[in-house]
Amino acid sequence: MKKIASKIILILFLIGTIVSCEDNAFLNQAPYSFTSPQNFYKTENDFKMALAGCYEALNTSSISGGLWVPDGTYARGLYYILEGCSDNVVANNSALSCDFEKATYVPSNQNLLLFWSSFFTGISRCNYLLDNIAGAEISDSLKTQYIGETRFMRGFYYQHLAQCFGAVPLNVISTPDNKAPRASLQSVYDLIISDFDFAYKNLKSTGINKSSANKWTAGAYLGATYNYLASCKRYNVGASLLAECPLNSFEWVNANDMSSKAVTVLNDVVNNSQYSLLPQAQYSYLFREGTKAFQYQECLFLSEWSDAFSDRYASITEQFTPSGSSTYGGSYGRHIPTKDLYNSFQEGDIRRDWNITGRYETGALKENIEKVDYYVPKVAVPVTSLLQWCSGKFRLAAPGTYTNHTINDCSLNYPLMRLADVKLQLAEAFYFTNEEASARAILNEIRQRVVNTTKTTLDDLNLAYQNADFVQELLDERRRELCFESKRRIDLIRFDKTTSVIQNLPVEGNTYVQAGVTTLKANWSYHKIWLPIPQTELDLNANLVQNAGY
């Protein structure tokens, strides 16, 4: 969730949530109060609490009715869903979250239900706020601010659901039809674009809370949505599956119009927002637990945690952190990077040895960054030992650094939209509007930040990364810059490259990486570009139809 004062979060959990349901518990969620909506939605404080609830579903660990959400939001699990079935990471475990790296997910997978349930809960909370704000005892300008942030969050939840499941039921009022069928992708994206566009045009440069969604957050997501739709149309994504599930068609999209719109809005965000790329010396601060002040300089949107540790916060054992002894805050090492990802980086690109590491080993040294201690993992080498090869992008403070900070706690802010991503999105839009020179200038800027000039030069890095196919070069650069940030699965799908990438993924690396690659290649089928509608939802609503192939 966005940064919400821990006091408000505590109030929300103490208040609890009334469940108002018929057969489907998640399309129709009551507001965050024991009082009636007529009595609750009045003062600014009421709306602050309600807005906190809208954000909270982003990485909640529990939702209405007492349902525990161990995997399915950005608290834990969703980033594995969104990195899975790609060339970035493979699985080394039988946990349900590993199904998404092995391409073995089925409609009964509980994590799918938790993802669906949590994000529809967020949508319903947004709808309650929107339905009740007209009578609020606050100024019109403040109402607009609340409406803008709430509509952004509704668009955010629907964007995730639509990119993963395709067509989904539309829920735009606080008393929806629990037997609603899936709406077409066109209808869903009409709502997403409308919500993002309203937020972009009506929000200010700063939000109600310190790092709430703001004008530029909304603009970044709006531009990215235009790019997504343009690429899906150009590359005929899912066309072979439409006979069985025509709801997932992109035929309605005007790709050139979408790319043109993307240039306009993304240019505005890049050139006029307050965000900037951190310099190379601070690049790692984007991914450390104790450097949040630096994250805010580049990150337009974050899945955030306060520093008040409790059992509701993400466990470091499930993060993309170096594995090893829990004494050092090591992860389980269930999700391991491919050697192909390692090889995609050239020597002298600082991102290689930051993103892919060895484990935390006995006697690991500490480093102090901005007055916070971190253990230092080994440098990755292609050896046979299981825990020598880690997706180590995120680094947690040494256990015990903070009050009540145990080996199973973390308050890491997980980046959801960084300016680097926005710039690469702009490069994409430039290319498809015949401005390749401007697109390449952005690639040059992204690489300039990460070249270690004691080992190589920017010219050499550009030469090594150059590809006659600009789209491939762009996707390669997005892979290097954004690996383990929940982007790769969707990038491969929207350019219709998932099958070819998986089929051509080399079976190399240590024994465990090779086994993971072999498993992924054996289980992948094209219909899995769409996640299956959860079986529980199908059982409760006979009007829902399953995606093709399941």
Image (cartoon, grey):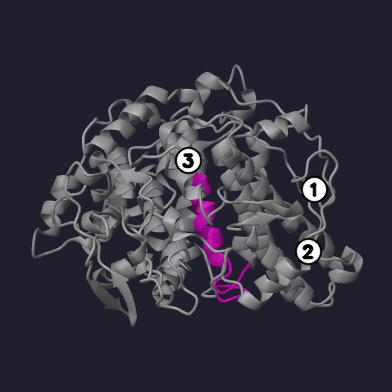
x then y, percent, for residue 355: 28, 55
Element on which disc 3 rests: loop
- Work out whether mark 3 precedes mark 2 in sequence or the reverse, and give the earlier one: 2
- State whether residue 475 is above or below residue 123: above
Left or right: 29 as drawn, with respect to 319: right
Q: Which amino acid does label 2 sit on?
A: Tyr
Q: How many marks?
A: 3
Q: Give the range drawn in magenta.
A: 203-226
Q: In which quarter of the image is residue 135?
A: bottom right
Which residue is rendered at x = 21% and y = 38% of the image?
A: 509
CA distance for labels 3 and 1: 30 Å
Residue nearer the viewer, 33 or 224:
33
CA distance for labels 3 and 2: 33 Å
Q: Mark 3 points at which residue?
A: 95
Q: Name the residue under label 2.
A: 32
Left or right: 353 as drawn, with respect to 323: left
Q: What residue type is labelled 3?
A: Ala
Say if residue 19 shows up in the picture: yes
x then y, percent, for residue 330: 35, 59
Element on which disc 2 rests: loop
Placement of the C terminus among the 4 image quadrants: top right
Say if residue 495 shows up in the picture: no
Q: Are marks 3 and 2 in contact (CB under 8 Å)?
A: no
Q: Do the residues labelled 3 and 1 touch (CB within 8 Å)?
A: no
Which residue is rendered at x = 78% and y = 64% of the image?
A: 32
Which residue is rendered at x = 11% and y = 64% of the image?
A: 453
x then y, percent, for residue 530: 54, 32
Give the class, few, some or many, for how many residues have Cα within 10 Å of label 1's Cα (few <14, many ≥20).
many
Placement of the N terminus among the 4 image quadrants: bottom right
Q: Mark 1 points at which residue?
A: 28
CA distance for labels 1 and 2: 13 Å
